[in-house]
Image: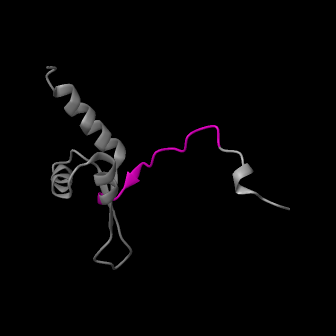
Amino acid sequence: MNFDVSQQKRPRIAPPEPEWGDVRDVQRQFGIRETHLYQLMKEGRIKSVLIKGRGRSRGKRLINFASVRRLLAEAQEREVPA
């Protein structure tokens, strides 16, 4: 059989947006700098989770994109229209 990639059907629905990402993903997606991002996490305004293995001192910090979107929507609502 010949499976030509160009003739494969594309999905009819768009792929879902990611729910979680690391600091670089948030910077790329939303333009929030690392220092400000960690401050927002410390204040509890953005949700994050640290994933690490048993007995490990380091891990991977993942940030919830929905909480970032919610923060930005709230900031937009507070803006006074010009």
Residue 5, horizontal then vertical, whole percent: 70, 56
Q: Residue furthest top?
A: 82
Left or right side of 67 for 20: right
The furthest residue to the right:
1
Q: Residue at x 20, y 54 (%)?
A: 33
Indicate the quadrant where residue 12 lies.
Answer: top right
Q: Which quadrant of the view contains residue 45?
A: top left
**Magenta: main secondary structure:** loop
**Quadrant in the picture for the N terminus:** bottom right
Where residue 63 appears, x then y in whole percent? 32, 53
Along the line of sight, which residue is nearer the eye, 19 or 28?
A: 28
Residue positioned 16% across, 27% down in the render? 78
Quadrant of the image for the C terminus?
top left
Number of marks in the rendered image: 0
Nearest the viewer among 59 and 35 is 35
Position of 26 with respect to 35 (left or right) is: right
Q: Which residues are magenta?
A: 11-23
12 up-or-down from 5: above or below: above
Colouring style: one colour
What's the residue at 39%, 52% (across, down)?
20
Horizontal side, residue 66 vs residue 17: left or right: left
At x 54%, y 44%, the residue is 15
Depth check: 73 or 45 in front? 73
Q: Is 13 included in the stretch rendered in magenta? A: yes
- Coordinates of residue 25 in the picture (x, y in percent): 34, 55
Residue 50 found in image quarter: bottom left
| Above or below for 76 versus 68 | above
